[in-house]
Amino acid sequence: MDVVAHIHAGQPTETPWRFQLDEMAWRDLVEGLKHDSLPFVGLWCDGVAVHALFMPHGTQPLAASLMLEGGRYPALSPARAVSSLYERMIFDLYGAEAMWATDVRPLVDHDVWAETMPLAAAPGGAGSNKTMLTFQPSEAMQAAGGVTAGSGPASGGRESPLHIALALDGDVIRYAETVTGYAHRGMAQRLKTCRVEDANRLTGRYVAGACAAHQAAFCQAVEAACGESMGPEVSLLRVVVLELERVSTHLFTLAGIARQAGAVLVASRCMWFREKLLTEAAPIIGSRLMMDHCVPGGVNLRTAAAMGELCSKLAELGEEIYPDLVTLWQSYPGLSSRLVGLGVVDSALLEQVGLDGPVARAGGGDCDYRRDMRAYDGLWRFTSGRHDGAVEDRAIILLEEVGESLRMLNTAGPKLGLSAGGRIDLYYEDGEGIGMAEGPWGAVLYWVRLKDGRVEHAFVRDPAYSSLLALEAVLPGQNVADLGLIRASLGVTASALDG
Amino acid sequence: MGLIRAVFDASFRQGSARLKPVGPRWPLLLFHVDTGGCGGCGMELEALAAGGYDMQGAGFGFASTPQGADVLLITGALTYAMAPVLEAAWKAMPTPKGVICVGNCAIDGGLFPENYTIMGGLNRKVHINLRIKGCPPTPQEVLDGLCSLFGQRAPAAAYAGASSSSTSS
Ligand code: SF4
């Protein structure tokens, strides 16, 4: 069965790439997906229907919708493992049940909220738990045996709150399971019937480290819904912000990996380099964490005309500092040997959890949405050549991507010249659009439906769900002392997971 | 929230000023809890700790357990799920102790005001010894804020232009 053709055979909707299926056709879709590699992006609910988004070619979307029947729908998780997280989120927010789901544990609602099923037509009463969440191990975890231990949600570190429950055999992890939801802010509810500008500010606070990626994707989705697309100048300015975000986030991650591997000097060099770049960039761009610069219809930069010069300046700093950092990383005694072979995410696991971004590129995956984005024409080139998928490979990929992004800034600088940036006024027509950006950890995608000049509904895809599944899968067999290191190298961030 | 209010005490400023001198030899140790934000304030705290802003020289450090901390440093808008965790951390800290809120989220919810999952920051819920506004505040602003607690001036950062007024993050 050709799954793409099967979706196209559904009933057309007002959105050319979204088709309405009935329940039998949806069930056939799930069966078909078990034997088809169609890339799955995500699943969401709007209270009336569920929608599954796929990406058959490059950035070309294809969606299937199913009206909820009695508050239930057939799960996609038997065919796409990562769908189980979307299904659990949908149940927690709407009470809509995924039939034959592979995992039915709560994802973000742990019986502590002021309202259960907050997005359902008739929300439930307040949760009854007023104390600390108690971890309920799954049957698989119980079967693993061993001594129970855990990490988070408040470890004293600076990472966002997540609990990782472990079954240990001495120092070796036998089984790992996570408890998420500590950082759930109700993004889906906040984005509902929200003013477009306010929604953009919220998307910039979805997850720090990928603020520009989220806002760029959201803005593109809004622009697509309005039938607009940005000119080359604005697109290039967005690329500059996105690449600078990648450099900053990768250096931050590399510092975390080096610190936890005991290479404190390397960690402080990474953070020092990052500060040098941000100290140059922030006064011109207007922020250090790249928040609120991509806005619907354009960009908002403190001194847009100085962006070209800034790119050249950052590239110069890169030429001065980056080669020595690479040498330091490669030659620092014990660093590579500490990371080699750790936390391997191989191609089979990548495919199973649907993970993209640098983690996939370090495991032989050839995936980078920048390849298909017009704004990256003449800038992006394929560079990754790692296949082993261990923490060491991921660190090297991140380091290489820092160099590549600085090279892109160098190329973008002269093209920008004294570009003024700016924005156009969008006329918010009713409609749907999607937008995507290659964030520091992989593709960030927004689907937005506009109605009466507001965001009626939005769906967010962040690589975090797939990274969480990858984390749980790679931990068994690892030493418990490497937990933080492996988590940092996979980019598992609670704020992105919890929404 | 009554539960939390009951356990936060207001003794920090008077108590610590008398009982504990502050400076490099007596660092004030902060236990950080992210109670549910975007993580931006946490990233800026990490930059403060590791990015060349002489935090230690100014007399501050991070504690890895609440038992070893003087101050609870809170970021994030306070989810219902994190409230008991925060309370447990507070209870585990020795007295005198205090509360510092870093970022708009932690103060009043910022972009994440009260809803079914968020309590909307700590303002008017507990006694806060120091509020450092911003979304997020820069590492230098956090350091300036910390130093102001004891009437000190923050040491200069190792970067030209990283002054407190340069940029908001
Ligand atoms: S105050 Fe702003 S930067 Fe800090 S956690 Fe909240 S949303 Fe993020």
Image: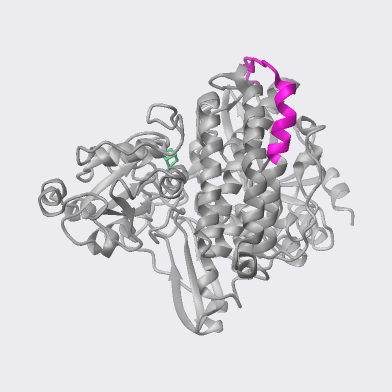
Query: Which image quarter: residue A371?
Result: top right
| Residue A447 in sight in this render | no
Q: How many marks?
A: 0
The reply, left or right, for residue A109 in relation to residue B150 is: right
The reply, left or right, for residue A192 in relation to residue A35 is: left
Q: Residue at x 50, y 42 (%)?
A: A187
Q: Residue at x 65, y 28 (%)?
A: A311
* Front residue of this view, candidates A260 and B11: A260
Rendered view: A64 above or below A33: above
Query: Which image quarter: residue A73?
Result: bottom right
Q: Which quadrant of the figure contains the N terminus of chain A?
A: bottom right
* Front residue of this view, candidates A179 and B98: B98
Q: Position of residue A53 (x, y in %)?
A: 72, 46
The reply, left or right, for residue B38 in relation to residue B12 is: right
Q: Position of residue A146 (x, y in %)?
A: 50, 84
Image quadrant of ligand 1 equals: top left
* Front residue of this view, candidates B98 and A83: B98
Q: How is the image coloured?
A: one colour
| Residue B141 in sight in this render | yes
Residue A404 falls within the magenta-colored stretch: no
Q: Residue at x 16, y 56 (%)?
A: B96
Q: Position of residue B69 (x, y in %)?
A: 27, 59
Region rendered in magenta: A405-429
Q: Position of residue A264 (x, y in %)?
A: 50, 59
Rendered view: A67 above or below A87: above
* Front residue of this view, candidates A301 and A180: A301
